[in-house]
Amino acid sequence: MGTSAVKDKDRLGSLIGGHIGVSQASFDSIAWVVAIVCATYARLDFNEDLVSWLGVSIIAPIAILAQIDSGIFMGLYSGRWRFGSFEEVGALVRTVLVCTSAVFLADALLLPGRAIPLGSVLIGAALAFLFMCFGRWWWRARTERISSFSGNRPNKLVIFGAGEAGYQALAAIRRDSSCGWEPVALIDDDPLKRNLRIFGVAVVGKSTEVEEILRKYDANSLLIAAPSAPLGVVTNLLETATRLKIAVKAVPNAGRLFGDAFDVEDIQEIQPEDLLGREPVKIDDSEIRSFIKGKSVLITGAGGSIGSEIARQILKFEPGSLTLLDRDESALLGVQLSIEGRALLDSPSLVLADIRDAKGVEQVFKDRKPDVVFHAAALKHLTLLERYPLEAWKSNVIGTINVLNAAVASGVTGFVNISTDKAADASSVLGFSKRIAERLTASINIKDATYVSVRFANVLGSRGSVLEVFRAQAEAGKPLTVTDANVTRFVMTIPEAVRLVTQAAAIGRSGEVLVLDMGTPVKILDIAKHYASRRNPPLDIIFTGLRPGEKLHEVLFGEGEPDDRPFHPKVSHVNVPPLSTESAQSAFSLLLGGDGEDPESDCDPMAIRKVLASICAIPSELTQNCENLVENSIQGGSNLTKVL
């Protein structure tokens, strides 16, 4: 073979996508030839004397060239889609339509006289498409049959979930014969999947029949492949499997499952996100990148679980510079280690400062000149703040005021305040202080700048989260503590929460609070049962009673807050009444005495709590005259609640 011929073959192989693509193109070419011959015979009533073999020999090459050219253009032969998948069939339909049009035009307009009847072209196109589909079905069925699950694998596996995750799991297990799992049955609660078979494995029942199915098939492993399954269903599966001493695994959460290729190695132990009972919300990275790329970004509370994850995710969007501010030097060491792989604390991006120090914060903003600020620094533990409400005022309110003032003075155009669902219909010091911070952020109104808050709930994996507490108690073999048997909470993963935060910077409008749709609240007792059941013998669960300020059920929206979703189906935009920084400080100072930052040291915590609740509830129309309102209305140490 000549050098030019070899080069032409290599060029064709690269365009088509390797040997498999060449084989597909060759088969499709043969399908067209056979189809045109059969269609011409049929159109001429199988009378061979009427068939123009010259015409057939002219049309067939045209069909072959049109099929290959349009197939390459459509990506049909590039290996882009799984062989025989719906996506590939869709590309095949488009390719055949283009090819048919080219052949029809050539036969009707370009050639001198018709090479074959026009009806033969249409009939041939239909036959060619059927031949191509049949060939793909046969090859896929043959491949799956050859690589089906062998009966000599030691671990018999039952899979819960016959959807996309279950399919991906079965495909990965089928590809890896060394994994040791032999899938024997599928379980799914969808009645429409009752007779479904995937790779020869049948759906044999629903989750309530799991014990019977596990025993019937002598299974020693259970795989949970349903990321959106309700927590109660997952808990029941885990309890049954634990009682039968059956190993339980789970597929990756949806964020990883539908991104990179899913392999057997990705099947893992139950993770916190598997207990959410919903699929994590997908966020549009392109909007975030356009907002962040090339800009100077500053993160307060950068050493915390949320702040550090914001830093890691922001780096993916190529900021011009990144400043990490925290008052905890050990936390800064940890975040530098996670980002740079070293912990020398010598990076210019690290700033040791306290948001309570107004002058210090102002100087940091003057030096770093940030364009975008993510304000994550805050005190967040409800029970402790009920005992020390003044600390909530100093960090969550005064600290936010200091950061906002510095941001406005330095010309920050994008500001995102991290809030909590406890700010909705607040009933605790934490909720009051974060609601005030939301309103303070909403009061900033600068042209061509966006100042918003993001409200989310309990974050799995953050320091002090309920799962971290349960994990520590379980590892120590101690009873698990739950406040109430009926207590529920909205929960989300750290990466998901942070993706919402970064998205807020791109789609939020000044004065708004963005709220994520977090699905159905999770029953904390179900999570506790999961951790308790993983120990042998199972751990006890102790009910401690609700703590002061704690709700039995959290809400995402306060009274009068509509659920408006103008840009993203899973992100709500709520307008909150603005509260000026001057009004908040004046009200606190006049009620408790002092300068608003260091009130009398003997102030009763309950009095401070009431003041925070009162400031939280100040109507927006009174904020500009708050000082006069307080001075004229407070008699003999009364509080702002009486005025309102």
Image (spheres, helix red, strand yellow):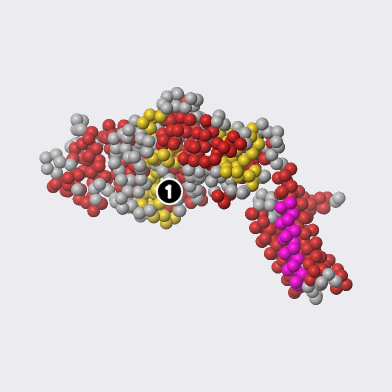
Q: Position of residue 243 (x, y in %)?
A: 52, 30
Residue situated furthest bottom in the rendering: 113
Residue situated furthest left in the rendering: 636
Q: Position of residue 29 (x, y in %)?
A: 77, 59
**208 on left or right of 105:** left
| Residue drawn at the location 58% of the way across and 45% of the way down | 162
| Residue drawn at the location 66% of the way across and 54% of the way down | 88
Asked which secondary structure carries label 1, the reply is loop
Q: Position of residue 626 (x, y in %)?
A: 20, 48
Report the number of discs.
1
Magenta residues (range)? 118-138
**208 on left or right of 470:** right
The secondary structure that most of the magenta stretch takes on is: helix
> In the rendered image, which quarter is residue 307 located in?
top left
Q: Position of residue 446 (x, y in %)?
A: 34, 52
Q: Amino acid at mark 1?
A: Asp
Q: Nearer the viewer, residue 501 or 557?
A: 557
